[in-house]
Amino acid sequence: MQRLSALFPSMKRIVILGTGGTISGLAGQAGDNVGYEAGRVAVDDLVAGVPAQPDSRLETEQIAQIDSRDMSFDIWRRLAQRVAHHLARADVAGIVITHGTDTLEETAYFLHRVFAPSRPVVLTAAMRPATSLAADGPQNLLDALHLAAMPEARGVLVCMAGQVHAGAEVRKIHPYRLDAFDSGDAGPLGYMEEGALRRLRDWPAGTPRGVAGLERTDWPCVDIVMNHVGADGRIVDALLASGTRGFVAACTGNGTLSSSLESALLRAQEAGIAVLRAGRVARGSLIDGSASRLPSAGALTPVQARVELLLRLL
Ligand code: ASP
């Protein structure tokens, strides 16, 4: 077996932060790719499972051990603190985060907006549990380690099924296939091929918001309300009564809302509640020109727009 030091010759360290997910999931039978429990295998053991021996240049830290459907503000706060800590270290080349696929795009966008880092922060995951006959986790993790070790790499990246996506654009598009992610109209940033990146476009860029305010424990409630046939304002009023501080409207078409839902959101906005319109359609960006008095989130998906609003309100 090859030593990891041979695979990753840089003297710098890679920190692997474990949060759980299917990549660390266990099923009762090797043939079962859906009836498993996520978040069971420790991040140390995931790293030991890539085809190499443990190496002192890899550091692991278990941040959480959850199914990512249960990702929480508490875990985001802790994750952001640890990412900030490790990015401040001169001896760290990059960070890999193992995560569940279900909310991975939200964590990726959150980290992109907070850090827009000049070093790589690579999220990786798996669609099949660690016990699967043909588990995808070990290859995804190995690819992510290669990416995090590249001296030229930067930004929040997602490495999955041989594809690399920018954290600002990635979204889950399939509940079962191994290549369950894409980057919308932008397309993937590149492909991992035997440890090398075939890059198609530039590394992600952005202005980091920074970690100020993330230490607060009272993160505001921001809720998503969807336009659909028969949508009305009742849900807005009910959520306002329960303490919502911001709304994202998941709009039909080019940012449209039923008259009744739009009126309720306008009333909320006039009362000082933050509102953003995002598109519920799978591709594209809202095009300016709509007469709506509710601001547009442009190309952001509803869940990305929710992160945006949350960070604004913190
Ligand atoms: N429910 C799992 C999770 O998000 C799915 C996965 O990781 O693929 O943790």
Image (cartoon, rainbow, N blue to C red):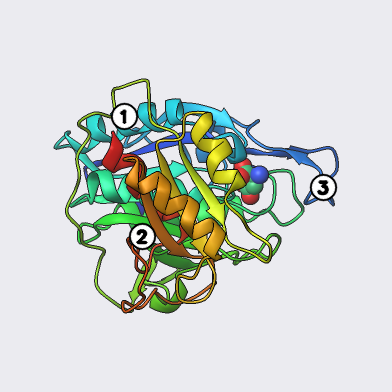
Q: Secondary structure at mark 3?
A: loop
Q: Nearer the viewer, residue 215 or 108?
A: 215
Q: Secondary structure at mark 1?
A: helix
Amino acid type assigned to the residue bearing label 1 in the image:
Arg
Q: Nearer the viewer, residue 245 or 81?
A: 245
Q: Is residue 138 left or right of residue 215?
A: right
Amino acid type assigned to the residue bearing label 3 in the image:
Ala
Amino acid type assigned to the residue bearing label 2 in the image:
Leu
Residue 300 image offset from top left, x and y in percent = 39, 63
Q: Which residue is mark 1?
A: 82
Residue 271 has which mark? none
Residue 123 image offset from top left, x and y in percent = 43, 49
Q: Is residue 130 left or right of residue 223?
A: right
Q: Which residue is mark 2?
A: 294
Which residue corresponds to the image point at 35% horizontal and 58% vertical from the top-left? 147
Quarter of image, ligand 1: top right
**First reached walking from the N terminus: tag 1 or tag 2:** 1
Q: How far separated are the C-alphas under marks 1 and 3?
A: 34 Å
Which residue corresponds to the image point at 85% horizontal and 52% vertical from the top-left? 31
Q: Which residue is mark 3?
A: 30
Choose top left, top right, bottom left or bottom right for residue 201.
bottom left
Residue 246 image offset from top left, x and y in percent = 40, 42
Instruction: Name the mark nearer the viewer: 1 or 3.
Output: 1
Instruction: Name the mark nearer the viewer: 3 or 2.
Output: 2
Instruction: Determine crowd level at label 2: few under 14, some 14-19, many 20+ residues with C-alpha closer than 10 A.
Output: some
Q: Secondary structure at mark 2?
A: loop
Residue 285 image offset from top left, x and y in percent = 39, 74
Instruction: Determine crowd level at label 3: few under 14, some 14-19, many 20+ residues with C-alpha closer than 10 A.
Output: some
Residue 75, visible in the rendered structure: yes
